[in-house]
Amino acid sequence: MNDKATQMWLGAAMLAAGLVHSVGASAQEPGLTDKTIKIGVFSPLSGANMAYGFDVINAAKMYYNKVNKEGGVHGRQIELVIEDDRCNANDLVSAVKKLVEQDQVFMLNGGSCSAAAVAAKDYVVRSKVPWVMLNASADGALYPPTDYIFGAFSITQYAVGGSVVDFGKQHLKAKKIGYINHDDAYGAWNLVL
């Protein structure tokens, strides 16, 4: 696992540890027992964009297994529930709802496709379930900040657009800049002209 992936999983585990520590032992939290923490992980595991999913899921499994082998989080073992979001907004929202309502996870750790991840924001905030985003970087999911969504392990789309335009102005001394982008919400976040 590369350093960036390690930092990402460490961040998720630290968040989980902080959340577990802040919850009293007698509190009845979904997905949290004296012995386990149930975490819902989702990524595209089928469909045209499944290449974004398997490495992410395998990295999650490896890291959470490492945490478990080292004693877990405050003695609790991490139990993963994995769902396929197909990198599609409807499927991602369905996966998140299943993880929260049916599987009763304590927190979510997923989102490889930025445009699809945005679709789950309102539901996650209403459900008050912590969500540590994986490598999705959609500003629409991260801004304005909420108490429940944590992300930006990678650069946000807003920063990407700004960096490209800035590079053209500063280093290429361009007088006019043409910026070609996706025509959906994912692309719109890149536009900071």
Image: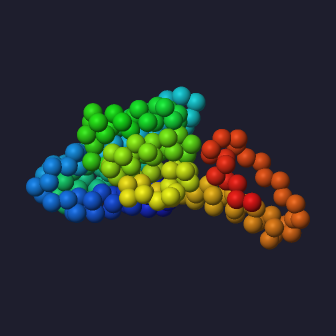
> For the point 50% across and 50% down, which residue is it?
141
Farthest right residue in view = 175
Q: Is residue 151 above or below residue 42?
A: below
In the image: residue 119, left or right of residue 19: right
Q: Is residue 173 above or below residue 127?
A: below
Q: Is residue 135 above or below residue 24?
A: above
Farthest left residue in view = 26
How many numbered discs?
Answer: 0
In the image: residue 28, left or right of residue 15: left
Task: Say which quarter of the image contains residue 167.
Answer: bottom right
Q: Position of residue 33 (x, y in %)?
A: 15, 49
In the image: residue 13, left or right of residue 144: left
> For the point 36% across and 46% down, which residue is it?
126
| Camera-side residue of 9 and 132 | 132
Q: Position of residue 138 (x, y in %)?
A: 56, 51
> For the point 25% across and 53% down, which residue is it?
68
Q: Quadrant of the C terminus?
A: bottom right
